Amino acid sequence: MKQIIQDLKSGQTILEEVPAPQVREGCILIQTTRSLVSLGTERMLVEFGKASLIAKARQQPDRVKQVLDKIKSDGLMPTLEAVFNKLGLPLPLGYCNVGRVIAVGKGVTSFQIGDRVASNGAHAEIVCVPQNLAVHIPDNVSDEEAAFTVIGSIGLQGIRLLNPTLGETVVVIGLGLIGLVTAELLKANGCRVIGVDFDPQKVALAQEKGIAGFNPAEDGDVVKFVQQKTAQTGADAVLITASAKTDDIMHQAAEMSRQRGRIVLVGVVGLNLRRDDFYKKELSFQVSCSYGPGRYDDNYEQKGHDYPPGLVRWTEKRNFEAVLFAISSGLLDVKPLISEVVELENYGQIYGDMKKKGVIASILQYPENIRKETTVNIDSAPFTGTGGKIGIIGAGNFTSATMLPALKKAEAPIKYIASAQGLSAKILAKKAHVEFATSDYRQILEDPQVDTVIITTRHNSHAKMTLDALRAGKNVFVEKPLCLNDQELKEILDTLAARPLQSITVGFNRRFSPFAVKMKQLVGNSPMNIVAVINAGFIPSEVWVHDMQTGGGRIIGEACHFIDLCSFLTGSRVSSVCMNALGENPSENTDNASILLRYENGSNAVINYFANGSKAYSKERLEVFSQERTLILDNWMELKGYGFKGFSKMKSRQDKGHNSQFALLTDRVKRGGEPLIPLDSLVNTTRASFACLESLKTNGWVSIDG
């Protein structure tokens, strides 16, 4: 299938051939018939992509600060590699999609195959959309009209926050697509509407709809105009849908408002507010968030948990439905807003010049007959290898920035990259000269040439995909964690027991770092004390890694790295664990915790895994004490030794062991050999991470069985 993407590095807008996505649980698969181009939002992305690196930095000062902090902690080259990798990942464009349902995921009951729906899907021939982000289209609403559903809900949410009442005067500043829809919805709500824009055509269109249009370039002082229209009282409310860098718009909005007026921002304008503007009139100001309540909430959008109407009357989905009702009942007429309908293949007519005058809404029309292949061939030379092939499942940031460069350096024989949506797999496969990109990982499991599968998806899918790969006769490398609970671990071990010739590896890369190898060489197998300080950094609570069902939390999902590292250095297995966490309710704060590990050979380790430290400080620091000798490793860039004959210091660019790990993995794929990490060590580390959380609940030491 084909999809429109924006290359942030080159600035090009591309119609890319990508694998068709797979329908996921709680989602529907839609074959697109129409999609609307949001000229404001998409023009911003296109212009950002075309900007120079310095111009990009100027537009994102917060990101620049993050980059500078990362340079301080990780060094210049790793930071630059991360930045350029991020810029090398294109963005899918579009969020106003209309089409027919062609597949229904598990757990979806409100949609059937053949239903005509509107959603926030991208500009792609097939999209996979969660059920709470799609709605049925009334029979009397055409596909072109329905394409305005999502863009209309953005304006509608601004109106919800404005809370207008019958007879109030509301000023809409910015009569672009969202502004015109918003003004008409306000008029339908019984408001007196004044529309402001510098484009005479947009002002004329507003006037045709019964809106008092005003062009400051031609008609003079907009504040005086509003005062005249309101008998010197001022506007009851101002809704800003404009996109401009100036702070003057907010100042004018305040000046034209009445005492205790309301201002809501839907667009993007300068926000250096003047206190006096708001102080004298006691004005209220609020910024509207996209389509409405539920936006950016994974529980609502991805997991399908709706908010009760009695508590949250207008969610983003119910806003979608309200816009379609307004179109269906004639309260909102969007047909005059359609400037052009363009075939998908001719997308350049729209994106070639997004500043064309007179264009309000551009609609893309999609062909009825499309290719629905879940696997596409990449027109480039594949890696060559003397052994079996590798298939990668997962095309996220880790795969792109860390794993693929390491595998490429090792000349790994990769045949596939898979991702559920298909686009990211295609981009990475093309970038790394991999033969095939697919959205269906079962294609990898069914290919007899593939004997090793690498899994880098979200944590909750690791166990299932590992089991699928093992049962398909493949060796498995799975990024940490191996699984999220004892039941999953038992099932994996039972499956492995029946397949003694298959191997499994977990991506505990730290033990393969030259620094870790040198430390192990220096301390040998004598009992030791280890103190590891992990300045992990704050991650907001709503991010998926904190979700115990999805990410397993940061101890199981991330701290397991350092349990394995301590086990590697001690040369022993964890026998018992005790963990304590910060705060009065430590069980709710597992990313600020101290883990005590007792080893079978008498060694002890303390892992301080903290999320409340400064980003400017080293992210990882390790101290090892043994036989009156001490090793100190700082952020995988410098190792110092005290009390060692012939060793005092080792220094290099940051090296966390990824290159060595994937070089060894590639060698095993080609030539065979012993597992990279003994299975009993992998299992012991996994059980120890589970025991950490058990210790937190029981407030005591927990023994590790087996």
Image (tube, helix red, strand yellow):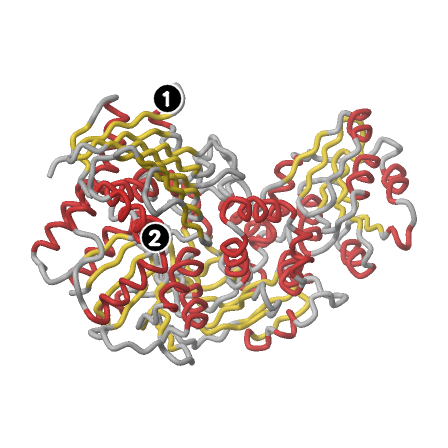
Q: Position of residue 432 (x, y in %)?
A: 42, 70
Name the quadrant containing residue 670.
Answer: bottom left
Which residue of the protein is positioned furthest toward the front in this rendering? Answer: 645
Mark 1–mark 2 CB contact (< 8 Å): no
Q: Which residue does the image show at 34% across and 42% down from the upper left?
A: 558
Q: Which residue does the image show at 20% across and 62% down from the upper left?
A: 475
Residue 585 badge? 1
Rate crowding at label 1 as few (under 14), some (14 to 19) or many (20 or more) other CA atoms within 10 Å. Answer: few
Rate crowding at label 2 as few (under 14), some (14 to 19) or many (20 or more) other CA atoms within 10 Å. Answer: some
Q: Nearer the viewer, residue 247 or 647?
A: 647
Position of 70 with respect to 605 (left or right) is right
Quadrant location, the N terminus: bottom left
Quadrant location, the C terminus: top left
Amino acid carrying label 1: it is Asn
Amino acid carrying label 2: it is Ser
- The secondary structure type at the circle numbered 2 is loop
Q: Position of residue 427 (x, y in %)?
A: 45, 68
Q: Is residue 141 visible?
A: no
Q: Which residue does the image show at 65% across and 65% down from the upper left?
A: 50
Q: Which residue is mark 2?
A: 513
